[in-house]
Image (cartoon, rainbow, N blue to C red):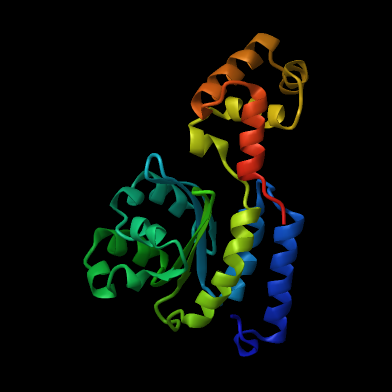
Amino acid sequence: MLLEHDLTSLELQLFAEILWKLGSENGQPYLRENIIADTATLLRADFAASYIWDAKHNLSKQGIMWRIDQKAIQEYEHIWQYNDPITLPLRERQKPTFVNEVISLTDLKKTMYYNEFLQPHGLYHGLNVYFIRNKIDVGDFRIWRAKDSVMFGEREKRILNLLEPYLSKALPFDLSTRYSLTPREQDVVTLVCKGLSDKDVANLLDISFTTVRTHLKNAMKKIGCNNRTEMALLIQHSFNPQF
């Protein structure tokens, strides 16, 4: 349980604002971007990043950064995630976890990942949490402090443990990651699940009726549904919970 001495009056106000955003922006596509700075500030972090874990391909996707050079996204996604010794074991914990709980700092410092990625970007003390809804990844927070900062403590874990269920419910579900849909297939599925007819979808996306049917047919095959009603019920029930 979060204790009163964990937060100052300003931090308590920030915590309340985070909960308000999670409720009012529930399911919005840019929620991670809108919440990461506030969360990192509440955790007294120096840096933060957020990705969505693609469990099918064991890859991190759709990265965003806070106080980290944006070129780190490209470096990580194209090079370093293939030599990352910490993300997979941290995700497997299914709870807020210090990086040194899965690998000692001594061993981490021996890796190219530390010497050529973490250290150049100033990332030293790490704390990660992965948000999973109905066994599907909807995002993560990778929180860091600099070398000259104090290590994260149980205070930060308590805060993340309180926020985790709200974040897991509020973050939008990425159909393309879960079912390997193309961007256009995801557009079609999203609109169909909102109740739009194929004709309405075609007009809205400015594509032909036949193209809509083709995208819908391919998407239903990937998702494993026999018809649009079954698909809509599956998507709405599994991935759009309300507070």
Residue sitting at 73 percent across and 21 percent down? 201
Above or below, 35 relative to 231 = below
Q: Is residue 74 visible?
A: yes
Q: Is residue 220 left or right of residue 12?
A: left
Pick out the residue farthest to the top.
210
Above or below, 186 relative to 57 = above
Image quadrant for the N terminus? Answer: bottom right
Q: Nearer the viewer, residue 154 or 84?
A: 154
Residue sitting at 71 percent across and 66 percent down? 19
Above or below, 67 relative to 234 = below
* Residue 94 position within the rendered picture, expressed as x and y whole percent measured from the top left: 44, 61
Image quadrant for the C terminus? Answer: bottom right
Q: Is residue 189 visible?
A: no
Quadrant for residue 42, please give it: bottom right
* Residue 23 position within the rendered picture, expressed as x and y whole percent measured from the top left: 74, 59
How many marks on residues? 0
* Residue 9 position within the rendered picture, expressed as x and y whole percent measured from the top left: 72, 85
Q: Is residue 241 left or right of residue 49?
A: right
